Amino acid sequence: MQLEGDFQIRSHSNYSTQVTAFEEVMESFAEHASENSILVFKQHPLEPDFMGWRGVVARLSREIGIEERVVFLREGSIATLLDSALGVVTINSTVGLEAVRSGKKVKALGKAVYDVPGIVFDGTLDDFWRAEFSPAPEDVQSFLKILVAMTQVRGNWFNSEGLAMAIEGTVERLHHGTVGKIDSMISPSESKLAEVASS
């Protein structure tokens, strides 16, 4: 799950609310997933939960007739969940990228930066549940290299050392005009992947 009202949902998806996405996913899961599979909803760790998501998910699963096959988690480790997951459906959360890195099948319902053929499942949601697919490791590594080269700087917001590192890296990129530029370390084939990813 993402934060309700997240910019990624409002501007980078066709959903006005996650509830619509939940309905779409549950209905598809009910119709097309194997009967012994379980659908897990994991709440965003920063979600204030004004919507009462556990109740929303329970109501929808009951209405669709799959309440015994749906689990809602308020807390929990994404890494642990990914270890036993067959796949991940997301609008465009960074969990999707983490799942891809773990070799999992991912279906992105929004306009995710990692929604690139060969990296995520590009068939329909209905086909996703039973399709045999895993991201090509070489494509994933190339994509991550491109993502880092074009958009990332080292650092974080949570301590002074990390913040200083982030500011220095950002200023360097702005000063040298390398924001969004293909790094010289990227091969020609990776450059083509970068064009697909940014289109």
Image (cartoon, rainbow, N blue to C red):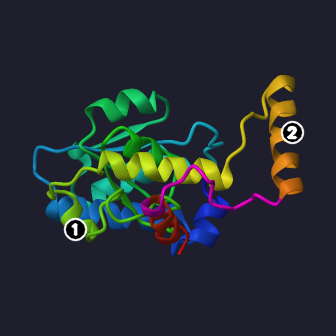
Nearer to us in this view, 114 or 85? 114
Residue highlighted by disc 1: 126
Dominant secondary structure of the residues highlighted in magenta in the image: loop
Q: Is residue 50 left or right of residue 75?
A: right
Residue highlighted by disc 2: 168
Residue drawn where x is 11% and y is 44% of the image: 36
> Which picture quadrant has residue 175?
bottom right
- Residue 17 percent location from the top left of the image: 55, 66
State the SS at label 2: helix
Inter-mark Cα distance, 1 to 2: 46 Å
Nearer to us in this view, 190 or 184? 184
Name the kind of residue labelled 2 in the image: Glu
- Residue 78 percent location from the top left of the image: 44, 33
Position of 25 relative to 76 (above/below): below
Residue 134: in magenta span: no
- Residue 144 percent location from the top left of the image: 50, 48
Magenta part of the chain:
177-189
**Residue 119 showing in the rendered view:** yes
Residue drawn where x is 60% and y is 47% of the image: 148
Residue drawn where x is 80% and y is 38% of the image: 166
> Which picture quadrant has residue 69?
top left
